[in-house]
Image: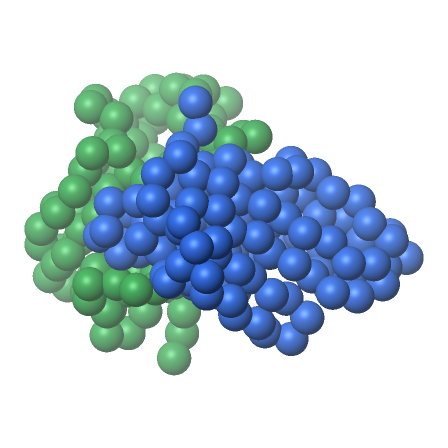
Amino acid sequence: SQELEQSPQSLIVQEGKNLTINCTSSKTLYGLYWYKQKYGEGLIFLMMLQKGGEEKSHEKITAKLDEKKQQSSLHITASQPSHAGIYLCGADITGQGAQKLVFGQGTRLTINP
Amino acid sequence: NAGVMQNPRHLVRRRGQEARLRCSPMKGHSHVYWYRQLPEEGLKFMVYLQKENIIDESGMPKERFSAEFPKEGPSILRIQQVVRGDSAAYFCASSPGTAIEAFFGQGTRLTVV
């Protein structure tokens, strides 16, 4: 079974709509990292969360970590074509920092004009 | 400041050949990590290296795979006698020390024919 579950696996939304991607762990998260990946390219770091209840925003993307530190959500407001790609959550479940992350399977986001 | 550089970007090998994947970390980074992304799967940790040392290789297959990070030059992930199942995207990440954040390269896409 997957240590980190992402949902949904794929998402198609109309441009301008809001959307949420979830990442759930069976273990306590020492750190939760959100990355974006475009096909054929590397991972672009978006945000990192460490504290229970923490919330961070960058432009139209907001990420939250729940109080129990087992679930994170990524919310995009007023989606744009540039938001299309694969969103990956990566988790530090050992307390070793970013050296050894466990990743979810990714959420493929398509934005329709 | 150049990011993490991986080469080649694409590599095609016949079954039984050797594959060598290179990773030059960001300037000033002494820690390197390799991850593998199999088709339709998430990234899986393979190995964590510091200069001239393997710190954690718990994700490396026991046979045919090896990694090094010499004092001078890039980190090398070497796969001997490749098989079709080795076809994947291999990502390298680097950090300056005990990492809160790791920066990823563009990846090398290995295809075994």
The residue drawn where x is 46% and y is 61% is: A53
Front in this rendered view, residue B38 or A62: A62
- Against A94, residue A75 (above or below) is below
Instruction: For the N terminus of chain B, give its image quadrant.
Output: bottom left
Q: Nearer the viewer, residue B100 or B61?
A: B100
Residue A51 lies in quadrant: bottom left
Query: Does residue B74 appear anywhere in the picture?
Result: no
Residue A83 occupies quadrant: bottom right
Q: Report the side of B59 relative to A102 (left or right).
A: left
Q: Residue at x 77, y 58 (%)?
A: A18
Of B110 and B51, nearer the camera is B51
Spot occupied by residue A14 in the image (x, y as percentages of width and height):
87, 53
Which residue, as the protein is rendered here, is positioned at the far right? A113
Q: Position of residue A109 (x, y in %)?
A: 71, 48
**Residue placed furthest toward the front:** A67
Numbered marks: total: 0
Please state if B89 lies on the left or on the right of A17 as rendered: left
- Could you tell whether A104 is left or right of B19 in the image? right
Taking B54 as reference, is B40 above or below it?
above
Image point (43%, 55%), residue name: A67
Name, please, the residue furthest toward the bottom.
Answer: B1
**Residue A108 visible in the displayed image:** yes
Q: Colour of chain A?
A: blue
Coordinates of residue B31 in the picture (x, y in percent): 21, 60
Residue at horizontal 12%, vertical 59%?
B51
Horizontal relation, residue A74 to residue A113: left or right:
left
What color was chain B assigned in the picture? green
The image shows residue A96, relative to residue B29, as above or below, that is above
